[in-house]
Amino acid sequence: MTLNDYRIEKGLTFEQLAKNLGFKGKNPATLAVRICLSGNPRYWKLPNAEMMIKIQDDITKGQVKIEDMVRSFLRKKKEHEQSK
């Protein structure tokens, strides 16, 4: 399951997800969009290792695995590059 799939399944907005992840700043929802691999592919990013562990273990209780995050990031980046 991807983080975005989890967000949708739980009925969370990007803002709510950002709050759950502890993001702060002017627009924390933007960072949630980026790590959910939504929006402009230019801005997609993988969270750092510490955040991926937090997402897997604390936030999603294992529903989103680190491997899922890495694989979906690489797959979506490749699909985007091939569509150019």
Image: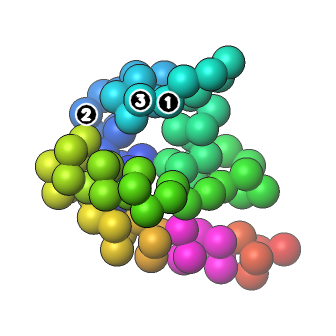
Quarter of the image for the C terminus: give it.
bottom right
In x, y percent, where is residue 47?
Answer: 51, 55
**First-in-chain label (3 vs 2):** 2
| Residue type at numbered disc 3 | Gly
- Is residue 13 in view? no
Of the two numbered discs 3 and 2 in the rendering, the one whose residue sits closer to the viewer:
3
Q: Are marks 3 and 1 in contact (CB under 8 Å)?
A: yes
The residue carrying mark 1 is: 23
Q: Give the residue at x 25% y 33%.
A: 10
**Crowding at label 3, few (<14), some or many (≥20) Cα neighbours within 10 Å?**
few
Query: Which secondary structure is most common in the magenta stretch?
Result: helix
Q: Give the residue at x 34% y 28%.
A: 20
| Magenta span | 73-79
Q: Secondary structure at mark 3?
A: loop
In x, y percent, where is residue 7?
Answer: 35, 39
Query: Residue placed farthest to the left in the image?
Result: 61
In x, y percent, where is residue 70?
Answer: 46, 72
Q: Are marks 2 and 1 in contact (CB under 8 Å)?
A: no
Query: Residue placed farthest to the top in the image?
Result: 26
The residue carrying mark 3 is: 22
Q: CA distance from mark 3 to mark 2?
A: 17 Å
| Residue type at numbered disc 2 | Lys
Q: Give the residue at x 20% y 53%.
A: 57
The residue carrying mark 2 is: 10
- Is residue 50 in view? yes
Q: CA distance from mark 2 to mark 1?
A: 18 Å
Is 76 contained in the magenta span? Answer: yes
Q: Give the residue at x 65% y 72%.
A: 77
In the image, taking residue 80 as reference, residue 35 lies left or right, namely: left
| Residue type at numbered disc 1 | Phe
Is 17 in front, or is 84?
17
Q: Secondary structure at mark 2?
A: loop
